[in-house]
């Protein structure tokens, strides 16, 4: 498996992250890189991220992971996370049951989940270019790493929705699967949960985008916007470029 990153410009932007303190870009970035196959991890990027990590429980989880020999074992990675694995790296696989027929695949929950993820990437101007499925966890995390440094691309709460409704709900079932096999990769999920919860707390005062069908059931208060601005390119089923 090759290293999958959203675009070349994505990699350049992410590599420039590195401010002091709680650097969400670096914290997400190191997890995204370590969730790739050990054979394709970028040592230079990892070094930059590790230098920027604050002394937190999240960093402790990363260091415990790196101290384990199995964290660098390609066979262990392949058997656990690739090739019909017990713990697939596709977060939607932990959130939705597989359809029983080809006819049901198009309307299944995971398919809609991936459509919405892809639309959110496009809203922020990022493109997978067909390299991976939208719910591939390293891609989801790398997206959060970069979008954390570009609040000007949001404004209507899409990033908060991503953390609240697309990422965090999938972490517990994936951790449960990893713990069943006593996998060292649970340490990365532990770190991810810590960072995502910190991110969620920072976003608590931001707006959160609601699907128009859901929003229609919520009473409109005086002075509150009744609709999402059409200039943002949102549609009933997701986002349009």
Image: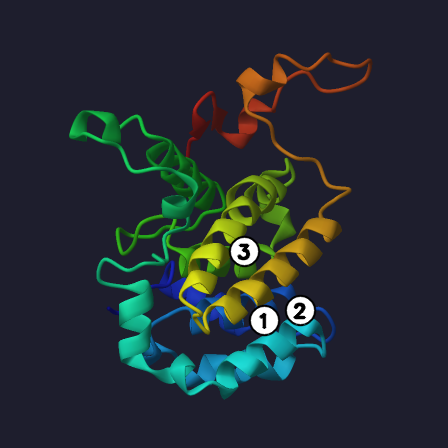
**Gap in angstroms between the C-alphas marked 2 and 3:** 12 Å
Q: Secondary structure at mark 2?
A: loop
Q: Residues within 10 Å of mark 2 (few under 14, many from 20)?
A: many
Q: Quadrant of residue 145?
A: bottom right
Q: Secondary structure at mark 3?
A: helix
Q: Residues within 10 Å of mark 3 (few under 14, many from 20)?
A: many
Question: Viewed as shown, does residue 78 lie left or right of 126?
Answer: left
Q: Quadrant of residue 131?
A: bottom left
Q: Nearer the viewer, residue 100 or 144?
A: 100
Rendered location of residue 88, percent (x, y): 34, 56
Residue 45 vs 114, above or below: the answer is: below
Q: Which residue is mark 2?
A: 23
Question: Viewed as shown, does residue 5 lie left or right of 205?
Answer: left
Task: Name which residue lies at 23% across and 57% down.
Answer: 84
Question: Viewed as shown, does residue 2 lie left or right of 96?
Answer: left
Residue 115 vs 33, above or below: the answer is: above
């Amino acid at each position: 498996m090759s290293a999958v990153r959203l675009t070349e410009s994505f990699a350049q932007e992410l590599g420039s992250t590195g401010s002091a303190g709680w650097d969400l870009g670096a914290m997400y970035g190191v997890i995204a890189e370590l969730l790739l196959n050990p054979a394709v991890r970028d040592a230079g990027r990892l070094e930059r991220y590790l230098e920027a990590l604050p002394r937190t429980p999240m960093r402790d989880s990363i260091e415990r992971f790196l101290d384990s020999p199995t964290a660098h074992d390609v066979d262990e990675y392949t058997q656990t996370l690739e090739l019909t694995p017990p713990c697939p790296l596709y977060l939607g696989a932990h959130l939705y049951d597989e359809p029983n027929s080809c006819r049901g695949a198009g309307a299944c929950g995971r398919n809609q989940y991936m459509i919405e993820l892809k639309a959110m990437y496009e809203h922020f101007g990022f493109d997978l270019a067909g390299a991976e499925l939208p719910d591939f966890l390293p891609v989801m995390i790398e997206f959060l790493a970069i979008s954390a440094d570009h609040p000007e691309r949001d404004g209507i709460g899409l990033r908060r929705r991503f953390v609240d409704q697309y990422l965090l709900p999938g972490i517990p079932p994936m951790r449960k699967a990893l713990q069943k096999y006593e996998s060292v990769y649970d340490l990365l999920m532990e770190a991810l949960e810590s960072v995502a919860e910190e991110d969620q707390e920072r976003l608590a005062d931001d707006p959160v985008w609601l699907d128009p069908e859901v929003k229609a059931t919520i009473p409109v208060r005086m002075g509150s916007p009744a609709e999402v601005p059409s200039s943002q390119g949102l549609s009933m089923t997701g986002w349009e470029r």
